[in-house]
Image: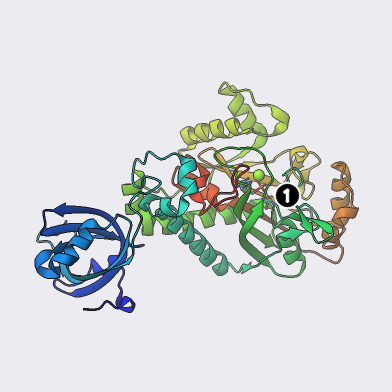
Amino acid sequence: MSIHLSERKQIQTVLASENGERVLIAGFLKRKRVLGKKLVFGIIQDNSEEIQAVFSVSDIGQENLETIAGLPLQSVCAVEGTIQKNADRTKKPEMLVLAFEVLSASEPQLPIDLGPGTESAMDLRLNWRFLDLRDERQRTIMLMLSDFERFSRDFFYREGLREIHSPKIMGTASESGAEVFTVNYFDARAFLAQSPQFYKQMAIASGFDRVFEIAPAYRAEKSYTNRHLTEFVSLDVELGYIEDVEEVMAFEERWIVEVLGRLKERWDSNVERLFGFEISVPTLPFPRIRMEEAIEKVNRSGLNVSAGGDLPSEGEKRLGQLIAEEHHHPFVFVTHFPFSVRPFYHHKADPRTSSSYDLLWNGVEITTGAQREHNYEILKRQLAEKGMKEEPLSDYLNFFRFGCPPHGGFGLGTARFMMSLLRLENIREAVLLTRDPKRVTP
Ligand code: 4AD
Ligand code: MG
């Protein structure tokens, strides 16, 4: 009997098939139990689900039974058999195996433990990330991240945004303050984009009403923390013809509520089983607090965070807790940042205040957003105020010389979003592969 992989079905589909139906599945041998010389129970897992396969000597013969009994876990096999529904409807169907083929055997000794409560340290797991991702919990994070992007695209297209792809090699640094990577560019020097900031604004100046981009951004930050990477995926939105920054915030909160609603619908039972809580969809509107007030509130609670009109991370954390107690809401927009702690391109609400915000989720910054200054003369004055030169930014400044719609937008780290959503301790679990100051492999 030969196996035809083209007939393979996903285990999730197979679990719903009729009693007695003959099907072919393929996946990793996740666990097995050998009962004497007559019976082997094997759990086969694919990307969608797992199923128990019953290998019995009477159906597959002695030689085949010995093969499966001796097969190392994590080997890849194709298994054909009939579906046996359990009389108890709450129990999953099994498969009675009629034929199987080992497609690729695993070495017997795995370098890391898989499964819940793994003893393997994060660093070791990251060295063996392709194996780590075979664990259902780890893989679920990635599948949900993919849905997060998909649902976001759905929302953005429906709202009239267009997707762009801007270059990641640049002649000037895009985010003052954030550290930039320098690369050799033939005989010259270039930089890796820290953000698509300048180019998404260019798209507005080019006449695309509203745009978004989901792409890598690079930060040469030496900080080795649980929420900073040197390469991360930034989801950026830029909206033309806005009235004010409030419109940007209103757009962002509507998007988050829709996306969380859809993630809940699709993933809630998996999240409950694997992470131990239910996804909650927040109410609209999200609370808003001015930076001044936020600092006061945090200081009144016993911290002392006057640091130049910005909130350090322990201040953000405390603010998140205080807002949760007061408003029963996990999100908060912190608004009216002093212009002194914001980049030159932010629009000013008044001489000392920028029209900008940070969005915190459970006390962690997931977004910075702002209305931009689109008036060429004012923009040049703001550059001077920051002590910056015009010349290196001349290409950027040109965007504002020939008519540019008023605009604003935001950037969100997709890994930060997943980290907050799934309450992960470490951002490294929310990216396929980690790039941090100590890691550029695998
Ligand atoms: O706050 P940031 O630096 O803002 C910008 O890049 C602006 N151009 C956005 C705008 O449109 N005004 O970065 C935006 C978001 C952060 O809130 C955070 O979620 C994420 O990007 N981020 C990082 N994620 C992982 N590792 C890092 N090193 C990150 N730096 C920023
Ligand atoms: Mg920021």
User: Element type at marker 1?
Assistant: loop
> Which residue is painted at 18% across and 61% down in the image?
66
> Which residue is painted at 17% across and 74% down in the image?
21
Q: Amino acid at mark 1?
A: Phe
In the displayed orientation, state which residue is furthest to the front.
63
In the displayed orientation, state which residue is furthest to the top.
302
Q: Is residue 361 left or right of residue 247?
A: left
Quarter holding residue 332: top right
Where is residue 92? Give x, y as percent.
19, 59
Q: Residues within 10 Å of mark 1 (few under 14, many from 20)?
A: some
Q: Is residue 384 left or right of residue 104?
A: right
Where is residue 24? Give x, y as percent.
26, 73
Mark yes or no: residue 285 visible. Answer: no
The residue identified by callout 1 is: 181
Quarter holding residue 39: bottom left
The residue closer to the viewer here, 387 or 49, is 49
The residue closer to the viewer here, 52 or 269, is 52
Q: Is residue 345 left or right of residue 139?
A: right
Q: Is residue 212 above or below residue 2?
A: above
Q: Is mark 1 within 8 Å of ligand 1?
A: no
> Which residue is painted at 11% across and 57% down in the image?
37
Q: In which quadrant of the rendered image does the N terminus lie?
A: bottom left
The colour mode here is rainbow
The residue closer to the viewer here, 294 or 135, is 135
Where is residue 42? Give x, y as percent.
22, 58
Q: How many marks?
A: 1
Where is residue 2? Give x, y as percent.
25, 78
Mark yes or no: residue 154 visible. Answer: yes
